[in-house]
Image (cartoon, rainbow, N blue to C red):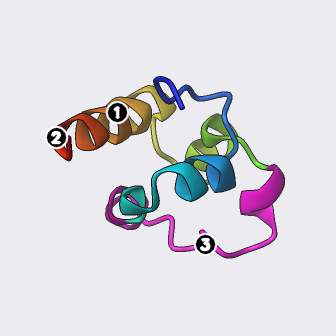
């Protein structure tokens, strides 16, 4: 998977990078296993939780990069 974007589904990101669950939890998105994670993209999930999607995507990408 290339760089994470806000258009990607939450479940696709978690399946490709399971270590990102830590970042999602930091933002209060503990619903990784919920049905919405299967069809909701990162932007929609962030907005529902009152989070700036650009900030979350940056943190996800920074976290993945730091794990290399």
User: Which of the 4 image quadrants contains residue 37?
Assistant: bottom right
Alpha carbon distance from label 2 to label 3: 24 Å
Measure how far apart labels 2 and 1 are at the Cα level.
Answer: 9 Å
Q: Label 1 belongs to which residue? A: 61
User: Would you place residue 24 above or below residue 12 in this image?
Assistant: below
> In this rendering, is residue 33 above or below 49?
below
Q: Residue at x 60, y 72 (%)?
A: 31
Chain part drawn in magenta: 22-39
- The residue identified by callout 3 is 31
Circle 2: is it few (<14), some (14-19), or many (20+) Cα within 10 Å?
Answer: few
Task: Please state, as top left, top right, bottom left or bottom right, where the N terminus lies in the image.
Answer: top right
Q: Give the x, y percent position of residue 5.
A: 55, 25
Q: Are marks 2 and 1 in contact (CB under 8 Å)?
A: no
Task: Report which residue position mark 2 lands on.
Answer: 66
Q: How many marks?
A: 3
- Counting from the top left corner in percent of width and height, residue 15 is at 59, 57
Residue at point 70% right, 41% down? 41
Residue at 66% over, 48% down: 12
Residue 52 image position (x, y, % from top left):
45, 35
Residue 56 location, quadrant: top left
- Look at the image and tell me whether residue 51 can be seen: yes
Secondary structure of residue under mark 1: helix
Q: Which badge, 2 or 1, is on the more N-terminal residue? A: 1
- Residue at 50% across / 33% down in the picture? 53
Residue 49 visible in image: no
Q: Quadrant of the C terminus?
A: top left
Between 49 and 42, which is closer to the camera in this rendering? 42
């Amino acid at each position: 998977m290339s760089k994470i974007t806000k258009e990607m589904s939450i479940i696709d990101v978690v399946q490709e990078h399971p270590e990102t669950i830590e970042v999602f939890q930091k933002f209060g998105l503990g619903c990784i296993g919920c049905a919405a994670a299967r069809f909701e993209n990162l932007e929609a999930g962030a907005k529902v939780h009152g989070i700036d999607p650009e900030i979350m995507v940056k943190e996800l990408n920074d976290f993945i990069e730091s794990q290399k």
